[in-house]
Image: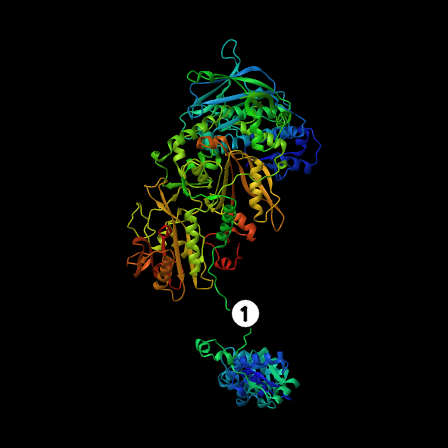
C-alpha cells in the first residue's frame, strides 16, 4: 500500500487547522490514512489504500481534511489560462510510447519544502499509476530555461516530442556534467541503468526538444538545463506514456497540488500527427473535465441499509468533494453527481455510494443478521477426508499437515524416483511430472508435491530427536501435470502414512491399511509390485475393490539413510477417492 | 496389623534403640536398598519408623594414589635412594639417584618439590643431601594412603587429607546415609503383632473366574507417582481449528465449496476485476507456473471471457468506466497456484461449479492458498484461507456487519470495527478489526466487502453478494496463542509442539 510522508506543520497550514499531532492522526485514520511512524525529519508517514491516488502529497491530504472538516464543500476546479505553448508530437515518436500530455504552472513561489513535496508526488505517482514509469512518466522543467519559437505564423511556442536513434544526439542529464547520448545514459548514468529495461527493444528512443535542442529523455531522465530548483517560479510539466487517460490523470493530480500552492495553471496544446485518431489529435491539457455518475436514491439506501432524506445525501456528497443535483430516473429520485477530475477511483455509481457511506460513517451503522435462511453443509469430499482422518487417528496415527509446495529433490530425487517429462499411468506412485513454479521463492519450494510420503519422511528426518514410535499420517493435496484436465493439472487428495519404530514391518502397515479399507467397506488386495522407494519383495500395490490406487511396503534403506533415519519405516499411500 | 512384606521385614530388622543404616537393613532382609528405602518412608508416613539422614564423606584413592601406595611416594623413594648412595654424608648428584629411585616422567618433579617440604634433606644446585634423622616409615601421607585403601579414612587427619587432595591422590565424595529407628508407635505395633498382608498385584482372568478376588487385598499403588509418557494419536491442531470454523459456518447456513488449487489467472484475477497490470499480478506476489503454463483456448469459457473483458475495458452499466489498462486473453489463460480461494467463489457464482444459483445462498471454504511472500513467524508461502459469501436480493453493509459480528463472536472476538478499505473487487470494502480475547489489542482479522457490479454482472448475477476472507492461521494463533506460525504448519513442524498442543474445540 502507498505511503506518503507529510510535514504536519505544512498540513496544518494547507488545511487551515490548528489541530495537535494526535488529533491529526485520529482524524486522518478516519479518512483511511494510517499513521505508520515518523521519518528522520519528523514527517508523518501515512499509509493508505491505493484508490485515492490524489492523496499522494501533503496538498492532497490537506484537501481531504478540508472536506472532512467542512472547510471546503463540493467540486473545485482550478481556473486555467489559455494555451501559449504547444507540444508537437512528431511522426518519429516511438510506437511503444506514443502518448504525451502537459501543463504549465506559473507564479509558484518555490521553496525547499514545496520542491520536496513535488518530487515526492512525482515519485509516488510513478510507483502507482505510472507502473514504475512504464505506463506513465513525469518530467517537470523550469519554463524560463525553455526556448520555443513559433513553428508557424499565429501558432504558440512549441516543443516537440519525437523519437531519435539511440546515438543520434547528446545532452547533459541531471546529476551529471557529461554530454551523453541516450544510449550512453542507459549504460553510464545510474538513473539510466535503473530504467534501461523500459526502453529495451525500442528502435527509437523517446526525446523532447525545444529550439535549443534535446532537453529530456523520457521516461528515463531529464536534462540538466531545465532542472527545477527552489528559485524556479514557472514550471513546464510533461508526461509521456502508453495510455493517454493515465498520463492525463497523473497530470491533473500534479496540477491540483500546485494549484493548492498558489500556482496558476495554464493550458498546453498537444498536437498529434496524422494517423492519430481524429478526436484525439488536438488536445487542450490539463484535462480538468468533471465526470458525471447518476445513482438512484433507492440504491444508496439499499446498499447502506438505512433511510436517508435527499438533502442529507446531497450534503454527504458535497462533504466528499462531489456535487449533486436531485433528478428523476425511472420515476424515482436519483442524483446526478459531479466527480472532480483528480478522482481516479470513481468508475461506477457504486463508488459514489461508498463516498456517501464514508461521509455518514460506516461505524454509525448498526449490524443486523441477514433475514434469509439457507441450509448449510460440508462438501462430500471434505466429509470423506474428515472421516478418513478420524479413522487414521483411531489407528494410532498422529495427523500431520505439511506444505503442498516442495522441491523435485525432496519429492522425487531423494525418494529414488526419476523426474519424468511425460505423464505415465503405469509409473510408480509419485513418479509423475510435477506442477512447477516459474520463479520460485526458494529452491526448497519449486514444485507442488506429486505424493505425500516424502513430506512425512521429511517430518521424520526433522524429528529424530523426538520420542518414538513416530506413527504419522497425512491426508492432503498431491498433483501432477495432466494435459487432459481443464487446468492441465490432475489434483487429488492422497492418504499417506508411516510407521517409524524399531520393529516396524510390512505387516504393520498392511494391518492398518486393511482395517482402514474395511471401515469404509472396501476389499483390500495387495499384489506384489516394485517401487524404487521400497524394498523389493516387501512392496505391494494397494488395490481397493479391484482398482489399483496406491502402494504399501517397507521403505528402502537407501531412502532411510538419505533421510538420516536409523530405524525401519513401513508406509502406505493411496488416493482418498478410492474410499468413496 | 497387616502390612506389605517389605514393610514387615524392615520393621522387624529395625531397632528401637540403635540407628541402623538402610544398607545394613537391606543386607539383613535380603532386599535392595531402594526397596528398603521406599518401605522405610512408607512406614515413616504411618508413624511407625523414624528415618534420619546424614551426609557422609567417602574417600578413595585415585589411580595415581594407588600407584604410590604400592611403589611408595616419589619423595620417599628419592630419600631411600639418597641414603643408599651415602647422601647423608656427601651431597650426591641428582642424576645418579633418579634411576635408583625408579622415578619416571613427572615423578621427578613431584619428588623434588616434596623432598625438602617434608624435611628429607636439601637440594642445592642439582645435588641432594639427605637428613639421616628423617624417618620415611613415619611419613603421614604414605601411611594415610594405606589407611584409605583399607577403607579406614576416618583415622586420617584433615590436614593430611587436604594435602593428598591437593596432590590429586584421593577423591572425596559426599553421600546421604539414611538410618532407621523404631518409634514408640512402631514398638507398640510390633508388640501387638505385625503380619504380612496377602496382596495381589494384578487382576487376572483366573482370579476373576475362580471367585478368589473376593478374599484378596490388592497391592496399593503410589497413585501420585509419574506415569509413563504416551504419544497421542490426534488430529492436527490446525485441522481442529479448521473443523471448528467449518462447524460454525455450517451452523450459520453456509455450504462448502471445493475446487482447483492450480487455476487460470482468469478465475483467480480477471473475474475479480483485477486489472492485468495490477502490481499484485506479478510473480513477486503470486506463484506463476512454468509447467503447466496456460489453459487451452478451447477450455476457456468464451462467453464469460468476453463479458469479463468488456467489464475491464468499458466498465459496467450506463455510467460505468473500465480500466485504462491492456487486457488480453493470453494473460487470462496463464496458470498459477491460486492466491486466494475467491477463485472458487467466482467459479460457483458463475454457475461453472454447481450450475446457476438462485438467491439466497451462503457458501464457504477453508482451504489452502499460495502467496509469494516472505516466510517468517507470521507469514507462510501457503496457508488456509477462510472464504465466505452470501448472496441475497437486498443485502446491505449492515447485513455484512451482522454476519461477521456473529461469526467472530463464536471465537470470543467482540467489538468488531469496520474500517473502510479499498479492494479492486468490492465496494464498499472493509478491513475488519477485533479485540484480542487475551491481550485486548485491536488486531486485523479479515477483509470484506460487497462485490462490485463489474464482478457480478459478467458472472450473470443480478443481486447482491457480500464476501470476506481471513487467514485460518491468524485465527488459530489468536485462539491457541502460538507465536510462530511455522510451529503450526509444514514439514518444519516439531512433533513435540504438536503432541503438547492444547485441544481446540
Chain ID at mark 1: B
Task: Determine the residue located farthest toward the top in the rendered image.
Answer: A153
Question: Camera-side residue: A265 or A457?
Answer: A457
Q: Position of residue B307 (x, y in %)?
A: 42, 29
The reply to whether residue A571 is visible in this rendering is no
The quadrant in which the N terminus of chain B is found is bottom right
The reply to whether residue A432 is visible in this rendering is yes
Q: Secondary structure at mark 1?
A: loop
Question: Camera-side residue: A239 or A414?
Answer: A414
Q: How many marks?
A: 1
Q: Position of residue B94 (x, y in %)?
A: 53, 82
Q: Residue at x 65, y 84 (%)?
A: B185
For residue B161, side relative to residue B250 (left or right): right
Instruction: State the colouring used for the structure image.
Output: rainbow
Q: Quadrant of residue A553?
A: bottom left
Question: Camera-side residue: A518 or B118?
Answer: A518
Q: Residue at x 44, y 64 (%)?
A: A468
Disc 1 designates what residue?
B226
Question: Camera-side residue: A323 or A298?
Answer: A298
Rendered view: A200 above or below B234: above
Q: Position of residue B494 (x, y in %)?
A: 48, 57
Q: Residues within 10 Å of mark 1 (few under 14, many from 20)?
A: few
Q: Position of residue A425 (x, y in %)?
A: 29, 48
Amino acid at each position: 500500500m502507498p505511503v506518503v510522508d507529510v510535514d504536519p506543520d505544512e498540513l496544518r497550514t494547507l488545511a487551515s487547522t490548528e489541530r495537535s499531532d494526535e488529533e491529526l492522526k485520529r482524524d486522518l485514520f478516519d479518512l483511511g490514512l494510517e499513521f505508520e511512524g515518523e521519518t528522520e525529519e519528523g514527517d508523518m508517514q501515512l499509509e493508505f489504500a491505493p484508490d485515492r491516488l490524489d492523496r499522494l502529497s501533503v496538498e492532497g491530504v490537506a484537501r481531504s481534511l478540508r472536506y472532512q472538516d467542512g472547510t471546503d464543500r463540493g467540486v473545485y476546479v482550478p481556473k486555467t489560462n489559455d494555451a501559449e505553448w504547444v507540444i508537437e508530437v512528431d511522426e518519429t515518436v516511438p510506437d511503444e510510447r506514443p502518448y504525451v500530455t502537459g501543463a504549465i504552472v506559473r507564479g509558484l513561489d518555490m521553496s525547499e519544502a514545496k520542491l520536496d513535496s513535488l518530487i515526492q508526488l512525482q515519485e509516488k505517482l510513478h510507483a502507482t499509476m505510472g507502473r514504475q514509469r512504464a505506463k506513465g512518466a513525469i518530467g517537470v522543467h523550469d519554463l524560463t530555461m525553455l526556448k520555443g519559437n513559433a513553428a508557424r505564423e499565429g501558432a504558440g511556442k512549441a516543443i516537440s516530442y519525437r523519437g531519435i536513434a539511440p546515438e543520434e544526439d547528446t545532452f547533459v542529464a541531471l546529476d551529471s556534467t557529461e554530454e551523453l547520448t541516450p544510449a550512453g545514459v542507459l549504460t553510464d548514468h545510474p538513473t539510466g541503468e535503473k530504467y534501461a529495461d523500459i526502453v529495451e527493444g525500442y528502435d527509437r528512443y523517446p526525446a523532447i526538444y525545444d529550439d535549443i535542442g534535446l532537453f529530456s529523455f523520457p521516461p528515463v531522465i531529464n536534462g540538466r538545463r531545465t532542472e527545477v530548483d527552489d528559485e524556479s517560479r514557472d514550471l513546464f510539466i510533461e508526461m509521456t506514456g502508453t495510455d493517454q487517460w493515465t498520463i492525463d490523470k497523473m497530470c491533473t493530480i500534479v496540477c491540483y497540488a500546485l494549484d493548492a500552492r498558489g500556482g496558476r495553471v495554464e493550458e498546453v496544446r498537444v498536437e498529434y500527427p496524422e494517423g492519430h485518431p481524429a478526436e484525439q489529435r488536438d488536445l487542450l491539457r490539463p484535462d480538468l473535465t468533471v465526470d458525471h455518475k447518476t445513482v438512484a436514491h433507492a440504491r444508496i439506501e439499499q446498499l447502506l441499509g438505512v433511510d436517508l432524506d435527499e438533502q442529507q445525501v446531497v450534503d454527504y456528497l458535497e462533504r466528499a468533494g462531489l456535487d449533486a443535483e436531485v433528478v428523476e430516473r425511472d420515476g424515482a429520485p436519483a442524483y446526478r453527481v459531479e466527480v472532480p477530475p483528480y478522482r481516479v477511483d470513481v468508475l461506477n455509481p457504486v463508488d459514489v455510494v461508498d463516498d456517501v457511506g464514508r461521509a455518514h460513517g460506516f461505524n454509525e451503522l448498526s449490524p443486523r443478521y441477514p433475514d434469509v435462511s439457507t441450509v448449510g453443509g460440508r462438501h462430500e469430499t471434505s466429509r470423506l477426508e474428515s472421516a478418513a482422518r478420524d479413522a487414521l487417528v483411531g489407528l494410532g496415527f498422529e495427523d500431520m499437515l505439511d506444505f503442498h509446495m516442495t522441491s523435485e529433490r525432496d519429492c522425487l530425487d531423494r525418494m529414488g524416483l526419476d523426474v519424468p517429462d511425460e505423464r505415465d499411468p503405469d509409473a510408480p506412485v509419485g513418479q509423475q511430472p510435477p506442477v512447477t513454479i516459474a520463479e520460485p521463492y526458494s529452491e526448497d519450494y519449486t514444485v507442488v508435491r506429486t505424493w505425500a510420503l516424502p513430506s512425512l519422511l521429511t517430518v521424520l528426518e526433522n524429528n529424530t530427536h523426538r520420542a518414538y514410535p513416530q506413527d504419522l499420517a497425512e491426508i492432503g493435496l498431491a498433483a501432477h501435470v495432466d494435459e487432459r484436465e481443464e487446468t492441465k493439472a490432475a489434483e487429488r487428495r492422497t492418504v499417506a502414512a508411516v510407521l517409524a519404530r524399531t520393529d516396524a514391518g510390512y505387516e504393520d502397515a498392511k494391518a492398518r491399511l486393511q482395517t482402514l479399507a474395511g471401515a469404509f467397506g472396501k476389499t483390500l488386495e495387495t499384489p506384489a509390485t516394485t517401487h524404487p522407494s521400497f524394498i523389493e519383495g516387501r512392496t505391494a500395490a494397494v488395490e481397493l475393490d479391484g482398482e489399483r490406487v496406491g502402494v504399501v511396503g517397507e521403505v528402502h534403506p537407501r531412502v532411510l539413510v538419505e533421510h538420516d533415519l536409523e530405524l525401519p519405516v513401513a508406509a502406505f499411500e493411496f488416493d482418498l477417492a478410492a474410499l468413496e | 496389623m497387616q502390612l506389605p512384606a517389605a514393610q514387615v521385614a524392615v520393621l522387624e530388622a529395625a531397632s528401637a534403640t540403635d540407628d541402623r543404616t538402610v544398607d545394613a537393613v537391606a543386607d539383613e532382609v535380603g532386599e535392595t536398598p531402594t526397596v528398603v528405602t521406599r518401605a522405610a518412608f512408607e512406614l515413616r508416613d504411618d508413624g511407625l519408623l523414624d528415618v534420619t539422614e546424614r551426609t557422609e564423606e567417602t574417600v578413595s584413592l585415585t589411580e595415581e594414589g594407588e600407584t604410590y601406595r604400592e611403589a611408595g611416594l616419589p619423595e620417599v623413594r628419592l630419600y631411600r635412594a639418597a641414603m643408599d648412595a651415602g647422601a647423608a654424608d656427601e651431597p650426591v648428584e641428582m642424576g645418579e639417584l633418579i634411576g635408583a629411585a625408579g622415578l619416571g616422567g613427572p615423578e621427578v618433579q613431584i619428588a623434588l618439590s616434596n623432598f625438602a617440604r617434608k624435611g628429607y634433606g636439601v637440594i642445592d644446585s642439582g645435588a641432594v643431601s639427605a637428613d639421616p634423622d628423617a624417618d620415611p616409615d613415619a611419613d603421614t601421607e604414605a601411611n594415610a594412603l594405606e589407611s584409605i585403601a583399607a577403607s579406614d579414612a576416618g583415622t586420617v587427619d584433615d590436614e593430611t587429607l587436604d594435602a593428598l587432595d591437593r596432590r590429586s591422590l584421593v577423591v572425596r565424595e559426599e553421600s546421604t546415609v539414611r538410618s532407621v529407628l523404631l518409634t514408640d508407635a512402631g514398638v507398640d505395633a510390633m508388640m501387638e503383632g505385625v503380619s504380612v498382608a496377602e496382596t495381589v498385584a494384578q487382576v487376572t482372568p483366573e482370579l476373576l473366574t475362580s471367585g478368589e478376588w473376593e478374599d484378596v487385598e490388592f497391592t496399593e499403588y503410589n497413585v501420585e507417582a509419574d506415569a509413563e509418557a504416551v504419544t497421542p494419536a490426534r488430529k492436527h491442531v490446525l485441522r481442529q481449528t479448521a473443523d471448528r470454523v467449518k462447524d460454525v459456518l455450517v451452523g450459520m447456513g453456509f455450504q462448502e465449496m471445493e475446487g482447483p488449487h492450480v487455476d487460470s489467472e482468469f478465475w483467480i484475477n480477471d473475474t475479480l476485476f483485477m486489472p492485468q497490470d495490477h502490481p499484485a499480478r506479478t510473480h513477486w506476489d503470486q506463484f506463476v507456473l512454468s509447467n503447466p503454463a496456460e489453459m487451452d483456448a478451447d477450455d476457456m469459457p468464451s462467453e464469460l471471457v468476453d463479458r469479463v473483458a468488456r467489464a475491464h475495458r468499458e466498465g459496467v452499466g450506463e455510467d460505468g468506466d473500465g480500466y485504462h489498462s491492456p487486457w488480453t486473453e493470453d494473460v487470462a489463460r496463464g496458470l498459477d497456484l491460486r492466491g486466494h480461494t475467491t477463485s472458487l467463489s467466482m467459479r460457483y457464482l458463475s454457475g461453472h461449479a454447481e450450475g446457476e444459483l438462485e438467491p439466497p445462498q451462503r457458501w464457504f471454504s477453508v482451504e489452502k492458498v499460495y502467496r509469494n511472500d516472505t516466510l517468517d513467524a507470521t507469514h507462510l508461502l501457503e496457508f488456509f484461507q477462510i472464504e465466505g459469501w452470501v448472496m441475497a436480493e437486498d443485502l446491505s453493509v449492515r447485513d455484512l456487519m451482522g454476519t461477521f459480528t456473529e461469526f467472530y463472536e463464536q471465537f470470543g472476538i467482540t467489538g468488531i470495527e469496520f474500517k473502510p478499505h479499498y479492494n479492486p473487487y468490492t465496494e464498499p470494502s472493509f478491513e475488519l478489526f477485533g479485540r484480542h480475547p487475551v491481550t485486548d489489542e485491536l488486531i486485523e482479522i479479515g477483509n470484506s466487502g460487497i462485490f462490485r457490479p463489474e464482478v457480478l454482472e459478467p458472472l450473470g448475477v443480478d443481486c447482491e453478494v457480500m464476501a470476506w476472507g481471513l487467514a485460518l492461521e491468524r485465527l488459530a494463533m489468536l485462539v491457541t496463542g502460538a507465536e510462530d506460525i511455522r510451529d503450526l504448519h509444514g514439514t518444519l513442524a516439531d512433533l513435540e509442539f504438536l503432541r503438547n498442543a492444547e485441544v481446540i474445540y
